[in-house]
């Protein structure tokens, strides 16, 4: 044990194996081990000195979580989770064993797919054809060009694009929700009208993405969809390792 502590990557079932040849953060990459306590185990390594969110270490952390998730349910820790020592880790596992087991059962055979929706920026023609107010302001600018008229037109276009995108985002959320086991709202992201994560059966993740891509094409004049996944199930685990509260539609 070094003075820098124990770096914690994830919690898994006690019988869960570690991926062959997998390594952790740091340079050189840290060796992994499991701290087992009852029915659960923490996947850990020595914490590197002066840990920073370097790209190399972020990727190593993410890659390990993905490899672990291929072998069974995983409660992923955010990058940079460091415990003081092994006894601290064991104490946490012992105190919250029932919660951890419930969360692992909840996530069994699941992956996360994140969907972000942004207003379509190349849809001005369809917006003008649809929105009477935007047409009126455009015509005013053509008749009497000027800073204030252009400003009003720009603001109206931005508001209309966001409104149309939000409506499309709600429709897409309704379409995708029945195809997932759970849905969690993500934090507000500047420019996004929708940020939602879906807990999907691993075997259904490709079909889920195809459905989302089809919806993106259908609504491309209103919204731009950005899909990420499959990902470790961050959005469905609370900071304490229990199943996170999910949202309705």
Image (tube, grey):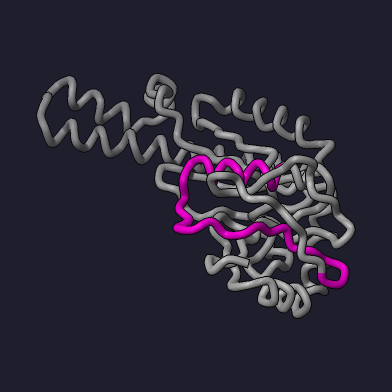
Along the viewing direction, whichever of 18 and 177 lies nearer the viewer:
18
Q: Position of residue 179 (x, y in %)?
A: 78, 42
Would residue 4 be visible to someone looking at this image?
yes
Left or right of residue 132, residue 54 in this image? right
Q: Position of residue 161 (x, y in %)?
A: 41, 35
> Magenta segment: does it hold 57?
yes
Instruction: Give the magenta-colored segment's residue range.
Output: 37-66
- Against 127, residue 245 (above or below) is below
Q: Quadrant of residue 152?
A: top left
Q: Position of residue 96 (x, y in %)?
A: 75, 76
Would residue 236 be visible to someone looking at this image?
no
Q: Quadrant of residue 126?
A: top left
Left or right of residue 245, residue 150 in this image? left
- Against 220, residue 205 (above or below) is below
Left or right of residue 111, residue 14 in this image? right
At a point 53% along the width and 56% down the height, the residue shown is: 48
Total of numbered circles in the picture?
0
Along the viewing direction, whichever of 213 and 152 lies nearer the viewer:
213
Q: Quadrant of residue 201?
A: top right
At a point 73% along the width and 48% down the height, the residue shown is: 199
Q: Position of residue 51 (x, y in %)?
A: 48, 56
Left or right of residue 107, residue 226 in this image? left
> Magenta segment: does it hold 75?
no
- Against 140, residue 165 (above or below) is below
Along the viewing direction, whichever of 9 and 173 lies nearer the viewer:
9
On-image quarter of the N terminus: bottom right
């Amino acid at each position: 044990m070094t003075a820098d502590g124990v770096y914690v990557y994830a919690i898994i079932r006690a019988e869960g194996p570690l991926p062959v040849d997998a390594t952790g953060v740091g340079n050189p990459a840290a060796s992994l081990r499991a701290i087992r306590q009852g029915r659960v185990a923490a996947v850990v390594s020595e914490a590197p000195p002066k840990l920073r969110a370097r790209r190399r270490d972020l990727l190593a952390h993410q890659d390990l979580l993905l490899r672990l998730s291929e072998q069974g349910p995983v409660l992923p820790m955010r990058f940079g989770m460091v415990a003081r020592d092994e006894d601290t880790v064991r104490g946490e596992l012992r105190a919250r064993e029932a919660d951890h087991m419930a969360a692992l059962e909840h996530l069994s055979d699941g992956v996360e797919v994140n969907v972000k929706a942004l207003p379509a920026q190349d849809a001005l023609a369809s917006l003008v054809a649809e929105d009477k107010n935007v047409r009126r302001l455009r015509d005013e600018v053509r008749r009497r060009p000027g800073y204030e008229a252009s400003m009003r037109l720009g603001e109206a276009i931005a508001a209309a694009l966001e409104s149309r995108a939000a409506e499309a985002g709600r429709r897409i959320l309704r379409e995708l929700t029945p195809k997932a086991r759970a849905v969690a709202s993500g934090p507000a992201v500047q420019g996004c009208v929708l940020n939602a994560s879906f807990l999907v059966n691993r075997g259904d993740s490709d079909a889920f993405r195809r459905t989302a891509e089809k919806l993106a094409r259908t609504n491309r004049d209103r919204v731009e969809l950005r899909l990420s996944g499959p990902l470790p199930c961050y959005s469905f685990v609370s900071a304490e390792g229990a199943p996170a509260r999910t949202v309705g539609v």
